[in-house]
Image (cartoon, rainbow, N blue to C red):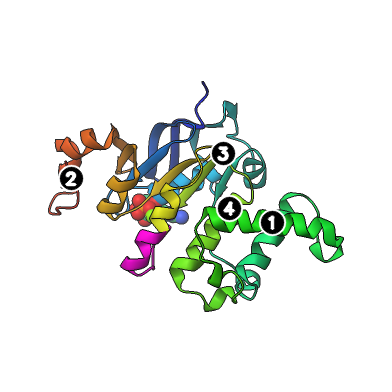
């Protein structure tokens, strides 16, 4: 079976500096895969190469068996690769229900939803409710102005908006960054509970959350893959401990 997402020799240089160094990585369909590594290891750059936000210096990216190395971002999204974006100014003034309904209308190519007959709108609204159920956004939060919601709830909405694109692979770069610890569990629990038709590649620095979530872990250091395997193997790896030298972060298993 094709990987959901696969890279071969993916590389990105900034001048003479190699931020991502010949990374070959395979994300299986439905995977719960974590990408970890010290600050500056190249994780965010790697995700930007996957989404097409940054051009690769060398190497390939394939999505569901199809080479998308040369495809622009919007085409990668169309083909099933989604990432989250911070809710922008426009969405911040809408309620989560309105924002999600708009995203679904956009995906369906309906354009401005204000022109839709009531019947079509009802279908989109039901779908929006389902997506907000999927990310476990509490009912009470769905009809409030998004900007007034706690950050954890805004993150849940961002994931719902990414899911509105009907992705097969979801890239999450520290989805709980800036969220108070009590709420970050809620965000990660929602991510872990996403339907299995979506493979998730998660970057997260909190090792408790990583080991709770991941079925496979890839460790990047200095832009290159240092280790790749089951969480128990990663926890035992001397090379990984070395990369986190001076910290007790990888202290599981
Ligand atoms: N646009 C850029 N220009 C120059 N260097 C960059 C750029 N983006 C990232 N880097 C460098 O690449 C390295 C990896 O950064 P990043 O991918 O953000 O790491 P991580 O997400 O793992 O913390 C860092 O040393 C960073 O300074
Ligand atoms: Mg980063």
Mark 4, secondary structure of its residue: helix
Q: CA distance from mark 4 to mark 3?
A: 11 Å
Where is residue 167 shown, x and y percent of the image? Answer: 59, 43
Mark 2, secondary structure of its residue: loop
Where is residue 179 shown, x and y percent of the image? Answer: 38, 68
Q: CA distance from mark 4 to mark 1?
A: 17 Å
Q: How would you rate the neighbour count of disc 2 (Cα within 10 Å): few for under 14, some for 14-19, many for 20 or more?
A: few
Q: Which residue is mark 3?
A: 168
Please give the range of residues in magenta.
Answer: 174-186
Q: Which residue is mark 1?
A: 126
Q: Which residue is mark 4?
A: 162
Is there any visible trace of residue 174 in the rendered image? Answer: no
Does label 2 or label 1 sit earlier along the sequence? 1
Front-most of residues 6 and 222: 6
Mark 3, secondary structure of its residue: loop
Residue 186: which quarter of the image? Answer: bottom left
Q: Which residue is mark 2?
A: 252
Q: Is residue 24 left or right of residue 250?
A: right
| Residue at the image point whose x is 51% and y is 75% from the top | 149
Q: CA distance from mark 2 to mark 4?
A: 31 Å
Mark 1, secondary structure of its residue: helix
Which-is-in-front pick, marks 3 and 1? 1
Q: How would you rate the neighbour count of disc 1 (Cα within 10 Å): few for under 14, some for 14-19, many for 20 or more?
A: few
Find out whether the residues at labels 2 and 3 contact each other: C-beta distance under 8 Å: no
Q: How would you rate the neighbour count of disc 3 (Cα within 10 Å): few for under 14, some for 14-19, many for 20 or more?
A: many
Find out whether the residues at labels 2 and 4 contact each other: C-beta distance under 8 Å: no
Does label 3 or label 1 sit earlier along the sequence? 1
């Amino acid at each position: 079976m094709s990987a959901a997402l696969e890279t071969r020799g993916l590389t990105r240089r900034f001048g003479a500096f190699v931020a991502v160094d010949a990374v070959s990585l395979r994300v299986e369909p439905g995977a719960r895969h974590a990408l970890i590594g010290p600050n500056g290891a190249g994780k965010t750059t790697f995700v930007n190469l996957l989404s097409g936000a940054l051009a690769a210096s060398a190497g390939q990216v394939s999505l569901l068996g199809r080479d998308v190395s040369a495809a622009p971002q919007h085409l990668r999204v169309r083909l099933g690769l989604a990432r989250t974006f911070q809710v922008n100014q426009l969405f911040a003034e809408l309620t989560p229900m309105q924002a999600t309904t708009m995203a679904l209308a956009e995906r369906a190519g309906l354009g401005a939803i204000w022109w839709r007959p009531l019947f079509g709108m009802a279908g989109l609204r039901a779908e929006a409710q389902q997506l907000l159920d999927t990310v476990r956004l509490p009912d009470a939060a769905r009809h409030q102005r998004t900007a007034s919601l706690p950050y954890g709830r805004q993150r849940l909405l961002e994931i719902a908006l990414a899911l509105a694109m009907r992705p097969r692979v979801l890239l999450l770069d520290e989805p709980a960054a800036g969220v108070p610890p009590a709420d970050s569990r809620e965000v990660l629990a929602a991510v872990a509970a996403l339907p299995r038709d979506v493979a998730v590649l998660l970057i997260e620095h909190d090792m408790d959350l990583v080991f709770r979530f991941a079925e496979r872990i890839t460790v990047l250091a200095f832009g290159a893959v240092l280790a790749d395997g089951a969480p128990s193997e990663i926890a035992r790896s001397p090379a990984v401990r070395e990369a986190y030298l001076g910290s007790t972060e990888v202290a599981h298993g």
